[in-house]
Image: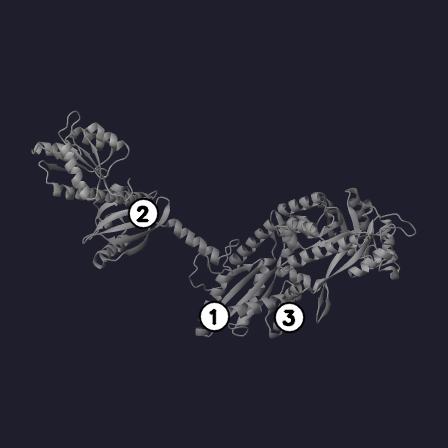
Amino acid sequence: MRPAESRPLAIIIDDDDVTRMLVRATLLKFDFEVLEAPDGRRGLELMEAGPPDIVLLDVDMPGMDGFEVCRRIRDRWDATEVPVIMITGMNDVDSINRAYECGASDFTAKPINWPVLGHRARYVLRASQSARELRELEERQAAIVRAMPDMIFRIGRDGTCLDFKDGFRSKAMLPPGGFVGKSLSVILPPGVAAALARAVGHAIDRGEVQSVLFQLPMDDGLRHFEARLAPCGSDSAIALVRDVTAQKRDEERIHRLAYFDALTGMPNRGHFLERVDGELARARREDRRVALLFLDLDGFKRINDSLGHAAGDELLKSVAARLKENLRAGDVMARPTARDAAMHYARLGGDEFTILLPDVKDIEFVKMIARRTQSVLSRPFTVDGEEVAVSASIGISVFPDDGDDAASLLRHADAAMYHAKEQGRNNWQLYSRSLASRAAARSSLESELARAVKEGQLRLLYQPQVLAKDGRIAGIEALVRWQHPERGLVLPEDFLPVAEQNGLIADIGEWVLRTACRQVCEWQRAGLFAPRLAVNVSPRQARAPGLFRTVSAVIAETGIAPELLELELAEAIVVNPDEPFVEEMRLLRQLGVRFAIDDYGSGHSSMNTVRRLPIGAVKIDRSFVRAATPPGDASVTKAIVAMAQTLGLDVVAKGVETVEQRAVLQAAGCPRLQGYLFGQPVPAEMVEFMLRTGRTAGAGAGGRGQAGGRVPGSRQPLRQADM
């Protein structure tokens, strides 16, 4: 194809030199570029370099005549690509017909009217260009139609299907022959046919596109269709019909994701709050009361930690099913727009559920529902073939007494639920205004803790671990405290549970790890013995992905030797750990990091459990240490020490406070001890003093010990094996 901005190229094929000269002169006046050929063979050779825009061809030539040349041109190019004007001296109808049969676009007879010839060439050229553009347009439209998923109908004003084309990969409602020539009322259900007939009439009369949504039963179930109708002349309309079943299903899926909990199928928080707002609006109009129950499962975290998240999810589904089945609520999932007469449920997240009672006659009815809910949940659940028991702490708020909107009622029911937890769990509590101050205090604590993390109010203290045989410092445990600007020193049991719930524990845990590792490296740079560092890892940190990435990054940043780092895990974490967490443990162990189980014996793990994991030590829970104090029984402690040593595990006894406890533990063969007898948690500078002087902070309590990596009176270093 020649560039659009260039002059059109014409090839003149004629054996008469004078005729070629005159044709050339004429075409040049009409702004053509011109090439000449004295015979048909030469003309075809010129065209091998590329087709011209137009050919002027003499009919009567020696050798290959014009008819044969035209046929050969048409073998390669059609009339829209290379138009041909045949010049004939035979002014007879047969020659003209023969010219057109060979593919000529036009003809002119001799003698030639030269001024007219130029216009004729321009006209033929323009006509061929228009035909070419029209063909290209038709091809594009045909390609679009072939690729369209829509079925295309032409429907007459009377509802008769005049034409039909199936859509690309679409499933037609009937075979193509089942449409053409038939009325919509014959081939479609009455309601659908009537709707489409009305749309056809509106499209024709108003000249506007109409849209109709309808459903049809098909072999594979109910399918959804959308028809868009546009006028086509004065007596018919074109209907594009698309199968939108997948789109409808996606919309339903999105709706469920937006409004329903994926695990239990219950309405989620957003849907529930909308439902509460609707019920409150009705309650205001009808002057009635509405109650909201907030349920939190007691002991769910223990089950989740001990049996794993998959088992926890199964339990949540069972709880949801039992609530719906036994309290006989309306099926809000199947009828999301219907008014339910009884109650509405939702799962807000985690192990929190809510029940809305839209028509409360008196408070005794609400109390009865709370008691019945606790009774329903009191029966054991079966999860993975095991029976597990949970209970529920329930908080109750009532409109209009306890709040005038959904957010207030939910917040106050939540406060009442926490009060139920404080009262020993497995009970229900009504909201009272006195609870508001407690909720405000908790909220204030959360805000202050977030600010404490940002402003650096957290402090690290360190408690020594000593070798039972000679009192040398073998390790230290890093312990976090909160130096509140107004409350003073806040203990971890007062703020770490809040941090665990609101997610701040991850930031706090990483800060503790980094700060403690950096401190050990500072002691090393000062020429002091560097004891093994024990750092606690919270359950939330352990369950979240990225533990290996975080710990390895801190090691690289601070330069601490991985062998000096010991991560302490709660016993519940290792009972049934997730495989990704186990893999991260293995990677860290390969790096040199050691793991210890904290408070061993307080949970449900066994030595067999420990054996399957890369655990290097167990820390005996302080309750066993207290129980072993004379005249107590030390048999359990001795058994733990013996089993651990059989598995090649180190053992640390926590909470050693008296000389008698130390003696019992030494006799039991416990190699390492930790407790107030050897030192309370102290700042880093006190630990440095211990390491320099060889005296622990607990020496005044009868617990004189050595530090700095040597036995008194000797220069013997503390070996790695002793650690």
Mark 1 neighbour class, 10 Å CA radius: few under 14, some 14 to 19, many 20 or more: many
Mark 2 neighbour class, 10 Å CA radius: few under 14, some 14 to 19, many 20 or more: many
For disc 2, the marked residue is: 150
Q: Position of residue 588 (x, y in %)?
A: 69, 46
Q: Residue at x 31, y 45 (%)?
A: 144
Residue 441 is marked as 3
Does residue 83 lie above or below 45 as drawn? below
For disc 1, the marked residue is: 280
Judge by depth and name the residue closer to the eye, 705 or 66.
Answer: 66
Q: Residue at x 65, y 46 (%)?
A: 584
Judge by depth and name the residue closer to the eye, 507 or 466.
Answer: 507
Residue depth check, mark 2 versus mark 3: number of the one nearer the observer = 2
Q: Quadrant of the N terminus?
A: top left
Which amino acid type is shown beneath numbered disc 3?
Ala
Position of 103 with respect to 711 (left or right) is: left
Q: Residue at x 18, y 43 (%)?
A: 29
